[in-house]
Amino acid sequence: MDTNSTSSSIIVRSYQRSDLSACHELFTEAHRGYNNPMSYINSHLQGDMADIEKNYLQIPGGHWWVAVSTEDNRIVGQVAALPMHLGDSEYYSRAPEEQRDQTCELLRMGVKQDVQRLGVGKKLISTLINFARENGYRQIHVTTLTCMDKANGFYQRNGFIKGHIQKKSLSNTPENTNDENKSVNNQPTDTIFEVGAIISDEDQRLMKLLVMESKFIYIQHYHLPI
C-alpha cells in the first residue's frame, strides 16, 4: 500500500461525541494487542474516556483528535493532550519547576493495525505539536512500556528523546498496569534508571516481558522539545 496515498486519504479533526464508541474500540484493540489486562483498559474506558469532552476538550490546554479515513469515514487513529499536572501528576511533581507548566502530556495514542506505518500516526503527532506550540508549551512528554516495541519505535522515529526508565512493582496493584501509566501506585518505592545507567541482565530480561508475564512494569519516559 502506498504511504502517500494513504496519508492523503486521512483527515485529522477534533473529537465529536458520536466518536466515543470508536475511540473506546481503538483503545481496547491497541492494549489487547499487548495482552494488557481488561482491568487496566476498563479503568480508562470508565474513567477519563467516559466523558472525553469534559476531561479533554473542556480542559484549558487539553484536546483530543481523531484520524478519519475519507474513503469509508472510519476512525483509524486518535491522540490526546493534557497539561502535565493532569496528564501525569507524578511526573509533574518530579519535573524541574520551570518545565512543569510548559510541558503537555501526550495520551491515548493509537492507530488501527491495518493502517500502521502508513503516516497516520505522524499526522496525529504533527497536529498535536502544532496545538502545543499554539498553547505555549515548550515540550511534549509521553510514556510507554519498554515491552511495547511498536510504540517505542514510533516515538523514536518521530523525534522523541529517551528519558529515564521507571520500574514499578505490580505485586500489590494487579489492576493498575498501564502504558502511559498514570495510575500505578508507588508500592513499594519505584526504581529509577537514569539515561546511561547500567541495567542488570535480569532487569533487561524483565523489560521485554508483557505485563501479564511479570511482577513489574518498566515505564519508558520520552520528551520532545518543540
Image (cartoon, rainbow, N blue to C red):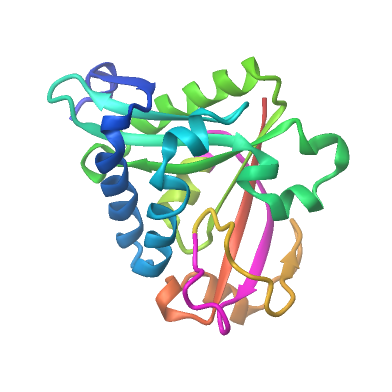
Rendered location of residue 166, percent (x, y): 67, 64
Marks counted in the figure total 0
Rendered location of residue 190, percent (x, y): 72, 72
Quadrant assignment, res 36? bottom left
Residue placed most toward the observer, 82 or 189: 82
Q: Residue at x 19, y 19 (%)?
A: 70
Rendered location of residue 2, percent (x, y): 21, 25
Residue placed most toward the observer, 175 or 211: 175
Q: Residue at x 48, y 35 (%)?
A: 54
Query: In the image, is residue 98 above or below residue 203?
Result: above
Look at the image and say whether residue 120 sits in the magenta stretch: no
Quadrant assignment, res 100? top right
97 sits left or right of 75 in the view: right
Rendered location of residue 21, percent (x, y): 25, 42
Q: Quadrant of the C terminus?
A: top right
Residue placed farthest to the left in the image?
72
Quadrant assignment, res 66? top left
Q: Quadrant of the N terminus?
A: top left
Look at the image and say whether residue 174 sits in the magenta stretch: yes
Query: In the image, is residue 116 above or below residue 2?
Result: below
Residue placed most toward the observer, 216 or 51: 51
Query: In the image, is residue 151 above or below residue 10?
Result: below
138 sits left or right of 80 in the view: right
Which segment did they paint magenta?
156-178
